[in-house]
Image (cartoon, rainbow, N blue to C red):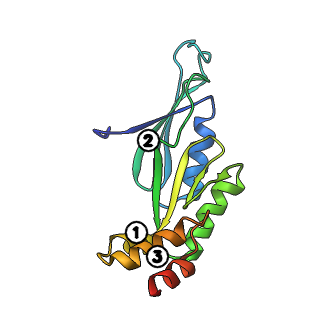
Amino acid sequence: MIPKNTICLWYDGTALEAATFYAETFPDSAVKAIHRAPGDFPSGQQGDVLTVEFTVLGIPCIGLNGGPAFKHSEAFSFQVATDDQAETDRLWNAIVGNGGQESACGWCKDKWGLSWQITPRVLTQAYTSGDPAAAKRAFEAMMTMRKIDIAAIEAALRG
């Protein structure tokens, strides 16, 4: 069944590589189908991979090999809620260690330029708890980090 809403991500010929990486890295993720071009198109030829249907953490996506015209930006990101430091480290290291880049406050980019927020649940709970002083301390601690350090967030919460 075709989902009513699907995220379409634009790639420059690397949609299958990206989808395969996501499927191997994130739980509840899979490459569902590969569709080849029925004819030549501006950035490829008949038989090239045109689209890839995949899921990331259960979210339906299509990777479109549209060519070099458009690049990913931070205006779109996947926010992944993690349960502990081991999961945070594993996902962060998988993305950054596979040609990606670190950014600030739990953000990183994969090698295809797609942005990810690897966000421990404790951080989200900290700034949504209703305790303004604790939220401010946790937020200030986060602002000094690249990958989120859960122990440091918990220490900030305690004051």
The picture places residue 151, in percent across and down from the top left corner, at: 56, 81
The picture places residue 79, in percent across and down from the top left corner, at: 45, 56
Spatial separation of the CA atoms under disc 3 and disc 1: 13 Å
Left or right of residue 80, residue 18 in this image = right
The picture places residue 143, in percent across and down from the top left corner, at: 54, 64
Left or right of residue 94, residue 125 in this image = left
Q: Residue 61 carries which label?
A: 2
Residue placed at 62% from the left, 69% from the top? 89
User: To which residue does mark 3 refer?
Assistant: 137
The relative height of residue 2 versus residue 159 in the rendered view (above or below) is: above
The picture places residue 110, in percent across and down from the top left corner, at: 62, 48
Q: Nearer the viewer, residue 129 or 37?
A: 129
Spatial separation of the CA atoms under disc 2 and disc 1: 25 Å
Earlier residue among tags 2 and 1: 2
Label 1: state its secondary structure. Answer: helix
Q: Which of 81 and 34 is in front in this view?
A: 81
Spatial separation of the CA atoms under disc 3 and disc 2: 37 Å
Residues packed near mark 2 inside 10 Å, few (<14), some (14 to 19) or many (20 plus): many
User: To which residue does mark 1 refer?
Assistant: 124
Left or right of residue 22, residue 159 in this image = left
